[in-house]
Image (spheres, rainbow, N blue to C red):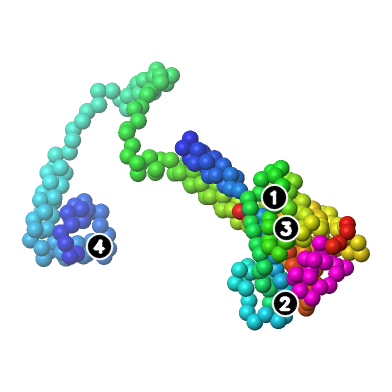
Amino acid sequence: MKSHNTERISALADGELKGLSRWLTHRHVRHCPQCANEYQRLQRVHEILTACPPAIEMSDSADFFWSKVRREVEAHEQETISIPMPRLSLSDWLLVHRAALATVTSSLMVVLATCLMLQQPRPTGPGAVMVERVDTIIPNTVATPLKGTDSDVAVIWVSGLEWTPDLDQMKECFNNIET
Amino acid sequence: MRWFLGVVVSALLAMSAEAATVQARLVRASNDSKKADKRLTDIEVKLKETFGYQFYQQLGAQQRPLQAGTKLRLDLGREFVLFVMPRSADKHQRELELEWYSGKTLLVRSVVKIVENGHLFVKGPEVGNDWIVLAVGVRN
């Protein structure tokens, strides 16, 4: 025992310590004048209490006493007793309302997760981008919807358009098409 | 608890109020170019997978916020114009009516259902050894 522990000294005096802790406390008391003094004081108190046991005399017999108690309890059984609630600090309130706190926290997490999921791009599945209808009115030309390499890609393949060597001729070519 | 519900409702309303934007890009697919067009970084891989060309050059692009019932005109340059008419929309998917013109000539018209960050590629006319491609996407 490195420090003076009055609770241990008291426990030793009360005979509550057993085994190693009892031996260690005894050893400390033998070498520590302060604790030895405290131990002796407590032992003296014990001696005094043992020498003068409390002489309490009950006016009634035990059976009669308990029957009175029972009657008292039954008489006041229907009474409503209001117990004033003490004012709780925040930490006390959180301790008391642990279930509510857990519910609010989990609800908040669910809402946040939902918000995040709404902001995320939708996972691409079959038909994520889909060509519903496609046509062209240029003669001898066909527009065909094709599936892309990924489901978030769709392709329209317009074939049959006239080939031109450069962009200027292409413009001229399309301007001359009669549809 | 009321303040908490207020915050949640406000957040949901704010998210739903975000306007989606349609973006159209006119792209030239080629095997002759020397370097990749950085403006097409986000779709270059998909273009390569779809059309097989090595290089893609953006000739023109325009994006506009989608408005229900409003026909949008997107000028892509080289006299190419895309008209976009939103038909319906849910949280993730939009139905669009598209008309792709070269000058006054309607090349192709289509109705597509497209998701956010999804792409529609239209393989258009062939110019020299290259192809003209229209890329359409919707994003928030």
Type of the residue with mark 2: Ser
Q: Nearer the viewer, residue A115 or A147?
A: A147
Residue range in magenta is A158-175
Label 2, secondary structure: give it.
strand
What numbered label is drawn on residue B81?
A: 3
Please, what is the three-letter code of the amino acid marked with disc 4? Ser
Marks 1 and 3, how far apart in space?
10 Å
Question: Which sits earlier in the primary sequence, circle 2 or circle 1?
Answer: 2
**Host chain of mark 3:** B
**Is A69 drawn above or below residue B94 in the view shown?**
above
Instruction: Give the distance between the C-alpha atoms of the residues marked 2 and 1, in whole angstroms.
Output: 29 Å
| Residue B115 located left or right of residue A1 | right
Indicate the chain on which mark 1 is placed: B
Using the image, tell me which numbered label, if any, was put on residue A21: 4
Depth check, mark 3 against mark 4: the one in front is 3
The residue marked by circle 4 belongs to what chain? Answer: A
Residue A75, picture quadrant: top left
Q: Mark 2 packing: few (<14 Cα in 10 Å), some, or many (20+)?
A: many
Helix, strand or loop at label 4? It is: helix
Q: Which residue is mark 2?
A: B30
Q: Amino acid at mark 3?
A: Val
Residue extending farthest to the top is: A75
Mark 4 or 2, closer to the camera: 2
Q: Is residue A48 left or right of residue A132?
A: left
Q: Nearer the viewer, residue A173 or A51?
A: A173
Query: How far apart in space, not on screen, are marks 1 and 4 (Cα)?
Result: 89 Å
